[in-house]
Image (spheres, rainbow, N blue to C red):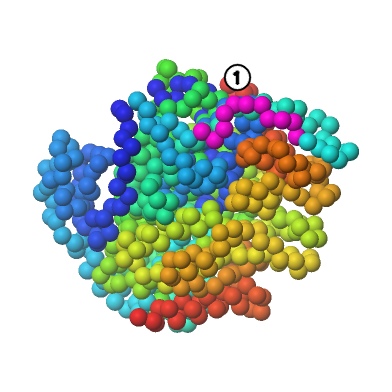
């Protein structure tokens, strides 16, 4: 088969509009499938000859009824924030934790990174498991005002690989929103995996009813990371997610020996600050690279509490404060 | 079949994002090329392709030919002038008129109209693209095809292995074509715990782990030469031992390598910098008429000797298995 060089349609617009019910299929979706939950399911040109055609055409169209359930379940949650980055390893989970520790009030922390969950270790609750009660799944409470939910809590063995395709991941994320008894929260912080794919589409679609207050983007200063973050900005715009601002992490490293500052990940293209200016989004601040942040994460301790005076802590608290300010601004 | 002229396929995997999969892939490719092998790099990170940026070919576009896509060439097979070393302590066995192998790349980045465009695809579409990358790219005859992957163990990985395992089991495929995987990690526990999942993924799918590379292990302050373990140290080696897979080594953070990728500047080090017992980079910067190939500049990078060792071990490892 000769490949086509036509521009791949980059956006699954149907999926962005809101979660839909997906019918049970008898065969895998073909390459040019309009999406079994889309309006054109079963009727598009590419549906001709697909074994699923009749099923898709007969499936009920319209918004996913579960969205209402989720909206009701999250009625007691005041603010919902996504932490996003196109790039992996820039500190999404670290910042999700910092926001959780830094915000006042009761905070819920939800890990949508199914194949590489990091929050349980960073929160020091790696070996916890979840319990079911009459009201649903109980999240793991780290303190009396901080609850965490992650797939890690459901694994039989902590190193087990979760080899799942998209639909299965989406199913679990839906459960996290629908079946977890979060209770009354001041903040729900949603940590995401890198990229712009299933998890991101699902979280956004499922939270359409209850409303996402905005997204915090995390990046490191070098262009290789910014390149992917630009894609994430494009994603937010297309998915109509408000961008609360962008944080530059690992910005500069101060040698503990001689206090000389090195730009390990050099911002050759102006870093996040210039990107924020170009894109017209708030710049939330720079956080220096401090080896103790990584160490605190490894031991599941709060860096903000352990080293409150360090420059990194000061910078992080300022970022947390700015996020709070941006959320309030309408 | 598409990979009949590819001798060995090596995957670069990691459960964790941002640990340097693309950076390690790039350096393995450059080093393999420097050792005279012909190399192809396939980037199947669809939502965050970095390979075009790493090879400095972001503006390149893929060309179409009857029957498939032609990968973007980085450099042809050629002979590089020997490394000049003006200092008296010149590397004694320094490569003389080095013969390098051809290098080409394929990535979704070469197909997108605008580098800012987000590729917002769900699983089935990613699966279709990965499959197309594995069947429709017209690679030149290659000694090694390196496949750079996104983080995780999901759609791209499942599709990649499904398609690859089908292909390598065909009678027309060269024997033992799927050589195995290089697994990349950073030293801290957070990263290790995700990468262990990837090692379990390899076990489950029967992919041989050729070795573990620990990236970002330590940073040498350019001012006082004190080495700080920015992301702690040693975790990769312990993990490799625990899973009984070979440990290739630790790669320190080298800002000069970042500069080489980000700005294309030839790595220069302060006088007296010694790596693996050899002084490097002395007296190179001022010589004007050197070629501007990335691979040539990379020879001056402090990480080059390190990767030279890794690649020799990898090639040996693959060779012993093929002969067994």
The residue closer to the viewer here, A165 or A193, is A193
Q: Secondary structure at mark 1?
A: loop
Where the C terminus of chain B falls, by quadrant?
top right
Q: Is residue B78 left or right of residue A81?
A: right
Image quarter where the N terminus of chain B lies is top left
Q: Which residue is mark 1?
A: B324
B54 relative to A305, above or below: above
- Residue B229: image location, x then y, percent: 71, 57
How busy is the neighbourhood of tag 1: few (under 14 within 10 Å), some, or many (20 plus)? few
Q: Residue at x 62, y 38 (%)?
A: B293
From this view, report whether residue A95 is shown above or below residue B281.
below
Q: Residue at x 81, y 37 (%)?
A: B85
Give the percent coordinates (x, y) of residue B152. Answer: 46, 48
Please, is residue B131 above or below residue A213 in the view? above
On the picture, is B288 further left or further right than A53? right
Q: Nearer the viewer, residue A149 or A112?
A: A112
Residue A315 locus on image (x, y percent): 59, 75
| Image location (x, y in percent) of residue A247 | 51, 68
Q: Which range is magenta?
A: B73-83
Residue placed at 59% from the left, 51% from the top?
A: B262
> Is any part of residue B322 visible from this angle?
yes
């Amino acid at each position: 088969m000769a490949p086509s060089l036509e521009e791949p349609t980059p956006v699954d617009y149907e999926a962005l509009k809101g979660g839909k019910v997906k019918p049970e299929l008898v065969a895998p979706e073909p390459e040019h499938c309009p999406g079994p939950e889309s309006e054109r399911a079963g009727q598009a040109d590419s549906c001709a000859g697909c074994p699923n055609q009749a099923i898709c055409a007969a499936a009920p169209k319209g918004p996913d009824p579960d969205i209402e359930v989720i909206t009701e379940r999250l009625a007691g949650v005041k603010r919902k924030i996504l932490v996003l980055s196109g790039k992996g390893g820039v500190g999404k989970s670290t910042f999700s934790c910092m926001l959780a520790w830094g915000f006042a009030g009761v905070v819920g922390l939800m890990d949508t990174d199914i194949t590489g969950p990091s929050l349980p270790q960073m929160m020091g609750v790696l070996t916890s498991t979840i319990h079911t009660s009459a009201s649903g799944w109980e999240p793991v409470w780290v303190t009396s005002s901080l609850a965490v939910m992650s797939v890690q809590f459901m694994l039989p063995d902590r190193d087990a690989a979760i080899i799942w395709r998209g639909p299965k991941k989406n199913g679990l994320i839906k459960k996290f929103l629908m079946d977890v008894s979060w209770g009354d929260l001041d903040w729900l912080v949603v940590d995401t995996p890198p990229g712009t794919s299933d998890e991101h589409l699902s979280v956004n679609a499922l939270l359409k009813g209850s409303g996402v207050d905005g997204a915090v983007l995390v990046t490191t200063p070098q262009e290789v990371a910014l390149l992917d973050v630009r894609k994430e900005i494009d994603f937010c715009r297309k998915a109509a997610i408000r961008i609360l601002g962008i944080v530059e992490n690992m910005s500069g490293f101060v040698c503990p020996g001689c206090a000389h500052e090195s730009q390990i990940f050099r911002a050759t293209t102006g870093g996040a600050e210039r990107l924020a200016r170009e894109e017209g989004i708030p710049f939330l601040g720079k956080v220096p690279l401090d080896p103790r942040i990584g160490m605190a994460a490894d031991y599941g301790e709060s860096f903000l509490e352990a080293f409150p005076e360090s420059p990194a802590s000061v910078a992080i608290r300022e970022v947390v404060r700015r996020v709070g300010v941006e959320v309030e601004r309408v | 079949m598409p990979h009949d002229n590819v001798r060995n396929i090596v995957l670069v995997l990691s459960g964790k994002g941002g640990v340097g999969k693309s950076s390690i892939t790039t350096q393995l490719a450059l080093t393999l090329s420097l050792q005279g092998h012909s190399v192809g790099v396939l980037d199947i990170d669809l939502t965050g392709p970095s390979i075009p940026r790493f090879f400095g070919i972001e503006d390149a576009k893929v060309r179409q030919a009857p029957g498939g896509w032609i990968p973007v060439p980085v450099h042809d097979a050629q002979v590089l002038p020997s490394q000049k070393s003006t200092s008296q302590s010149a590397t004694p066995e320094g490569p003389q008129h080095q013969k390098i192998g051809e290098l080409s790349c394929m990535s979704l980045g070469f197909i997108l109209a605008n580098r800012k465009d987000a590729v917002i695809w769900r699983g089935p579409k990613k699966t279709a693209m990965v499959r197309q990358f594995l069947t429709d790219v017209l690679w030149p005859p290659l000694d090694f095809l390196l496949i750079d992957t996104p983080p995780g163990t999901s759609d791209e990985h499942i599709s990649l292995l499904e398609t690859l395992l089908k292909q390598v089991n065909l009678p027309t495929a060269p024997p033992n074509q799927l050589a195995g995987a290089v697994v990349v990690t950073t030293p801290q526990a957070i990263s290790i715990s995700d990468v262990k999942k990837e090692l379990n993924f390899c076990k489950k799918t029967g992919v041989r782990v050729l070795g573990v590379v620990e990236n970002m292990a330590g940073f040498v302050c350019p001012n006082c030469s004190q080495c700080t373990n920015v992301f702690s140290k040693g975790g990769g080696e312990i993990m490799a031992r625990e899973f009984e897979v070979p440990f290739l080594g630790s790669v320190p953070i080298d800002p000069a390598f970042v500069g080489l990728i980000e700005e294309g500047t030839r790595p220069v080090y302060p006088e007296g910098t010694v790596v693996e017992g050899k002084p490097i980079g002395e007296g190179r910067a001022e010589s004007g008429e050197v070629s501007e190939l990335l691979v040539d500049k990379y020879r001056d990078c402090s990480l080059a000797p390190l990767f030279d060792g890794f690649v020799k071990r990898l090639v040996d490892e693959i060779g012993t298995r093929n002969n067994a």
